[in-house]
Image (spheres, helix red, strand yellow):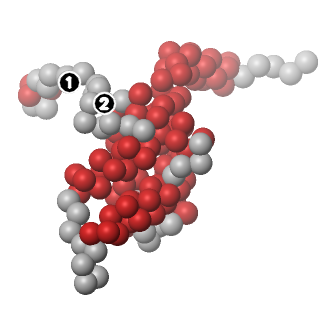
Amino acid sequence: MKKRDEPREQAINSRRLEFCERGTRGMSRDKAIELINDEMQRCPDDMMLETLGHRYIDASGQAAETADAIIAAYESGKNLKGAIKKSKDHFRSRNKNGVAYIPDAEVHEFIDKYFGVDLDTATPPPKRRVDLGDFLA
């Protein structure tokens, strides 16, 4: 019979406990971030995709309801490239002589609706107080 490796077993049990403590909210955040990151990695030169991707990665990391909405959107076939295409089609009517000015906030609001999220009302994590004494030692 093979001997058990005690440190390895402890590490595995520690990871299991951490996984259970994180619960499904931590998993949904991780999954949302992974979905967005995978799409961004497929098109590394697309700056618009990268900018939006980071916006939703940050939002997913801060609010579980945003992460859940992102996952639901991806599962229904929506993605960042689709959001960009829809927004271009939507704002094309403002094009005058090959130029259109659309404020970032307006584009973000449109894409938020596309994904079914409202980043203005998403609950951020509680703020922690920082003691400057922690940095002076």
Figure quadrant of the C terminus: top left
Q: Nearer the viewer, residue 92 or 19?
A: 92
Q: Is residue 32 left or right of residue 8?
A: left
Q: Is residue 117 left or right of residue 105?
A: right
- In the displayed orientation, state which residue is furthest to the right: 1
**Element under disc 1:** loop
In the image, what residue type sits under mark 2? Ala
How many residues crowd mark 1 within 10 Å: few (<14), some (14–19), many (20+)? Answer: few
Q: Which residue is mark 1?
A: 127
Q: On residue 33, which mark appears?
A: none
Picture quadrant of residue 16: top right
Picture quadrant of residue 67: top left
Q: Of discs 1 and 2, which sits in the foreground?
A: 2
Identity of the residue drawn at 30% across and 30% down? 122
Identity of the residue drawn at 44% across and 55% down? 83
Identity of the residue drawn at 72% across and 22% down? 5
Identity of the residue drawn at 27% across and 30% down? 121
Q: On residue 122, which mark appears?
A: 2
Q: CA distance from mark 1 to mark 2?
A: 14 Å
